[in-house]
Image (spheres, rainbow, N blue to C red):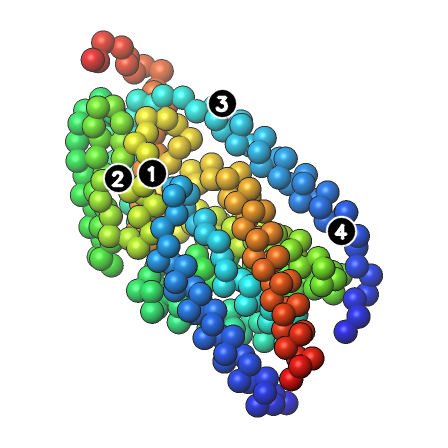
Amino acid sequence: MENKAPKSTKFWVVLIGVILVVAVAGMLVIQSVREEGAQVVITWNGEVEGTYPLDQDETFVFEGENGGRNVVVIENGMVFVSEANCPDQICVNHKPTNQTADPIVCLPNKLVVEVSAPNSENQLDGVS
Amino acid sequence: MMNVRKLTTMAMLTAISMIVFLIEAQIPLPFAVPGVKLGIANVITLYAIWTLGRREALAILLIRVFLGNIIAGNVMAMAYSLAGGLLCWVIMSLLKPIMGRSQIWLMSILGALGHNAGQLGMAILISGTTTMIWYAPVLIVAAVVTGAFTGYLTQILLGHMDKLQKHA
């Protein structure tokens, strides 16, 4: 089978190049908008489970009816997933974070852990 | 009419794509980005699109997504695989008539972009939060890299299969 009219390779390379440049710019923008947050929003199974302060150490165990299990830990002002029974373990490998725009996600178990910025009335200082 | 040769080729390709899919699922990745993998099974989809046809490639893809995720014990992942795989197939099928064989690596990149977009969309839908949109730029860069890789593999594969055909 002959191709009708193959567009030049250059066309596609330029198109993909533009997409790539936009994506890299997007990564830089995300880096720059990241800031230290004060609280953690945990979403489990598509519903917000709760919002918890980052300055109080706590451990949450989530167990779903379909066998999903995740353990979320808030420790020393950072949040991370310490344990999960999902096959990919991406959430467990995610570095502990206290940054916004850096969500920890467990796709198979539908868990999203997201740090959010402090509310204006929150006073963060004097924690130590 | 589907002849026996075509049917056995499709069965073979389905089996190969499932094995590749299952092995790949066992390889841990050093960076924590949900949904990022090499996607070597896409070599089979590309190969099928070029040697058998678009509909045949779709059939192989659907069986792989269905059986692969069941065997991997990861039924939850099926929705993500399906959304990604279908969008990838749609894009590559649309590109097929306007691309040459030396441009498969480009077709593969655009397909991988569709795959990751579909997966991200499904993830946002299922998780009920839009926060995963932060991953979009990383997923785009990953798609360009992995897409180029699997596309180039397909071109090498097609070249070798040509030689085999000649000597058969």
Image position of A98 with respect to A84: above or below: above
The picture quadrant where one finds residue A98 is top left
* Label located before the other in sequence (2 or 3): 3
Residue that mark 2 sits on: A81
Image position of A83 with respect to B54: above or below: above
Left or right: residue B10 versus residue A40 is right
* Label located before the other in sequence (3 or 1): 3
Residue that mark 1 sits on: A94
Q: For the residue marked with disc 4, what is the amino acid?
A: Thr
Q: Is residue B79 visible?
A: no
* Label located before the other in sequence (1 or 2): 2
* Labels 4 & 1 near each other (Cβ < 8 A): no
Q: Are marks 3 and 1 on the same chain?
A: yes
* Label located before the other in sequence (4 or 1): 4
| SS type, badge 3 | helix
* Label located before the other in sequence (4 or 2): 4
The chain identifier of the residue carrying mark 2 reads A
Q: Nearer the viewer, residue A84 or A124?
A: A84
Q: Is residue B10 visible?
A: yes
* Label located before the other in sequence (4 or 3): 4
